[in-house]
Amino acid sequence: MANPRSLVFALYNHWSVVEWLVQRSREQPAFEAEQVLGLIGKVDPSMTLEVREAVLRTLTNAEILQVLPRDELLQLNAHVLEFVRGLTREHELGLSAVLQARVQGIREATARLNEALERRDLDLLRQAAVQLAELFRQIAQQLDQDRHAILEIAEKAKASDSQIPAERRYRQVLQAYDDYVEPMAAMMDSGPAGSFYRLLEEAERRLDYSLEVLTAQGALYTLRLLVRQAGFQAKELRRLGREVLKQCSDTLLPLREELRRHNSLSAAVSQLLGQVRKRGLTRTFRHAELPLWRAERPRRVSVGDEVRAIMAEARDFQAVSLTFPEEASVVSVTELQLVDGVELRERLAASGPVPSLLDWLHAQYAHLSDATLLRLYHELINEPDWHFEQEGQKRISELDRLRVTHYPHGIFAR
């Protein structure tokens, strides 16, 4: 189990890295160690490889990153993920079923509160009030998180490339509306079919009545304060529910209607154009229904001056004899600069640590041209058998005619 102090201290020291990992966790739930090291290097390019590895060890020891069982992949601690998403407003859209279950939990807690009032059981009344207050807090937190998640979904859909088809751009918008907003609207209906406001009103009335009973009996001030605060939470939750539902509906409904209108218009236009293409404009439309922009124009086929000029040239055409060029001389082997790839790789494997591959090639094969050296350099660093590591500092390599500024690839350990 993670030490809370160590975990919080590691979060304080490496917050920027953890924040980037939380953002990347939307697309990739687990990371390889090399990916985390690369991400740490992007956050602070001045870190050396040893410092990045030390940061990775710190995050792992504090259990911010946990190793998956039967694997070597790393995954963010679930508590850390929820905590950072809550602070950075990066929450995923919750499930409407979870919200409905919590709302139904208000019914059971209210029934327990009524039982406590009938039995004059102050301990049971305290437990029911605490349970109601916790349910109100959880529902309010989920509503606030879902509101920010829906706003982010809408912003991403609006900011996406306009060249992408509307169905793909607004796919997540439609899913959020169908899976969350519509069930939420049905649950928050103020009529007899809705359960949100009805249960909240019942819980609010019972809490107010409990406060009156406790005040008349002279109960402890802490108990009366608890019941009063729970009643205030119920009133605030009713207001928050109306506000979140209205904001979510106002955000997603225009995008949903735009997509449906676009789909209906596109389907109608495509069907009409298909009929015109197959049957013709006159047979598709009756004379009374023809568009106003249609105009009948007489058509006459005539030969233009360009066609006459082409026909005259074709009539006076005479074939021209062409002499094929002589065969080009064969390029000598020395000019091709052939390199023994097997010998090169054996020599590289026997050289031990190589800080800069390009400088090593220039030193070992000084007779080769700059283009050949660069070609060999790119071939070697792209081969999967070699484990090259790229340094974080620039280096200038002097070749025969070129001066290359690069981040050198090298082999530091076998």
Image (spheres, helix red, strand yellow):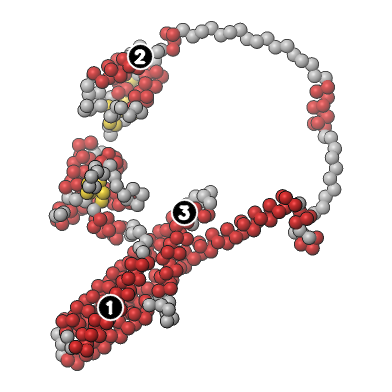
Nearer to me, 34 or 158: 34
Q: Which residue is mark 2?
A: 340
Residue located 29% across and 27% down the image: 386
| Category of crowding for the residue at label 2, using alpha-carbon neighbours closer than 10 angstroms: few (below 14), some (14–19), many (at least 20) | few
- Give the image location of residue 122, x and y in percent: 16, 84
- Give the image location of residue 88, x and y in percent: 31, 58
Q: Quadrant of residue 70?
A: top left
Please tell me which of labels 2 and 1 falls first in the chain: 1
Q: Mark 1 belongs to which amino acid?
A: Glu
On screen, residue 249 above or below 221? above
- Give the image location of residue 182, x and y in percent: 44, 69
On screen, residue 354 above or below 56? above
Residue located 26% across and 88% down the image: 209
On screen, residue 163 above or below 404? below
Q: Which residue is mark 1?
A: 108
Q: Which residue is mark 3?
A: 159
Quadrant occupied by the N terminus: bottom left
| Category of crowding for the residue at label 1, using alpha-carbon neighbours closer than 10 angstroms: few (below 14), some (14–19), many (at least 20) | some
Q: In what element is the residue under mark 2?
A: loop
Q: In the rendered view, does 234 fall on the left or right side of 261? A: left
Residue located 36% across and 73% down the image: 240
